[in-house]
Amino acid sequence: MGDGSTKALKAANMFSFDEYLKVAHEGRTPVDIGPFMNDFLTNPKYDASGAGGYKSQAGKEAKAGLSPQERLQQSYDKAQREGRRASPRLSKEDDKSGKYSPYVVKQVELQAGPIELGIIAPPHQDSRRPIPTILAISRGEQRHVAKLFRALRAEERGWQLLVPMRTANSPDFFEPAGLTILEQLLKAVLEDREGDISPFGAMSNVFHFLGMSHGSAALLSLACKAPEQVGSLTLIQGFLPQLCEIQALRNTENIHFYVGDQDELGHREYLRGIKESLKEAGGRSHTHLVKGASHYDIDKFIDLEDLWKRLELAR
């Protein structure tokens, strides 16, 4: 692959964006992944279109007339579309197995717009005492409680787990308008004295952020906006949204990234870029490569006991 020959740059040899980095950039990962992704998708030298990108000659001709900024935006849009495939729902058999947490859904009205909130919590107590609280956002369209979140069985460990879910008209949570919704939700939960939103308060007025893919991007943006309310930040896959100021997390501890060694959507590179940006800002994070996991089945390979150890250490 890295012999510098023309053949090495053909789509037949271009198995992934990771291979592109090896061939075109000697394995160097950029801090800003956008231009590299744009080059991979649009440069005819690499013929990425032959590997499943732009399928028609008409599409290629239309793309040739785009400005560099428009091509870059298309690259971002494509990456987002690829990540929208939702997490698998539980089968009826799984739902009845007792291995996954039940949850309730509340409608929450915020100034920026309504959302639904999935809630997993221990049996409700009369007193609204604070307990460790996970704020989790699913992958895809962010309208469900991910199977992995239910597999954690947070209620059995004395934690509550809150899952914001978009309504049909809500923006993506990693977009500026969606981020405003999340900021208002944090404030509402912290100010909730009667249990109108969540059954328990958040211990120490902090949340343990846990995201998957698009949900990771949303929570990364939220963490950068409100670092003082981050007890820990765990990203399972994910990418750096535009306008996200990663230097805000330079003093944040307990930042962990999980990604499959078979991830086919470039998230190893995305997270590597975030890690390097954070390091340049004076912060630190820990990356965990999940062996055998691709983008869409990583929940089957993550060691949940190991994940819980990291959460408990951060409480």
Image (spheres, rainbow, N blue to C red):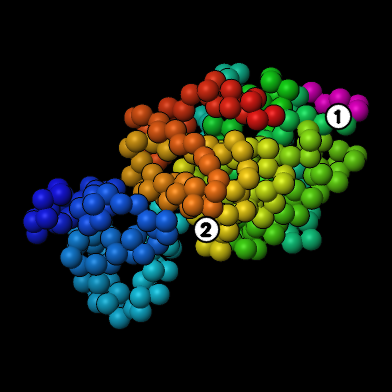
Give yes or no for residue 181 being in the magenta stretch. Answer: no
Q: Nearer the viewer, residue 1 or 70?
A: 1
Rendering quarter of residue 111:
bottom right
**Mark 2 surroundings: few (<14), some (14-19) or many (≥20) residues within 10 A:** some
Please report the residue visible at 18 percent of the width from the left and 65 percent of the height from the top. 45
Which badge, 2 or 1, comes first in the chain's sequence? 1
Q: CA distance from mark 2 to mark 1?
A: 35 Å
Please report the residue visible at 34 percent of the width from the left and 60 percent of the height from the top. 37
On the question of residue 246 being in view, the answer is yes
**Quadrant assignment for the C terminus:** top right
Which secondary structure lies at badge 2?
Answer: loop
Span colored in magenta: 123-127
Q: Amino acid at mark 2?
A: Pro
- The x, y position of residue 91, in whole percent, is 51, 29
Q: Which mark is residue 271?
A: none
On screen, 272 above or below 303?
below
- The x, y position of residue 197, in whole percent, is 81, 42
Residue bearing the label numbered 2: 241
Q: Is residue 91 left or right of residue 253?
A: left
Residue bearing the label numbered 1: 129
On the question of residue 101 being in view, the answer is no
**Mark 1 surroundings: few (<14), some (14-19) or many (≥20) residues within 10 A:** few
Which secondary structure lies at badge 1?
Answer: loop
Please report the residue visible at 34 percent of the width from the left and 78 percent of the height from the top. 66
> How would you classify the magenta stretch by its main secondary structure?
loop
Q: Nearer the viewer, residue 11 or 101?
A: 11
Say if mark 2 contacts mark 1, CB within 8 Å: no
Rendering quarter of residue 117:
top right
Q: Is residue 199 left or right of residue 169?
A: right
Give yes or no for residue 125 being in the magenta stretch. Answer: yes
- The x, y position of residue 272, in whole percent, is 41, 46
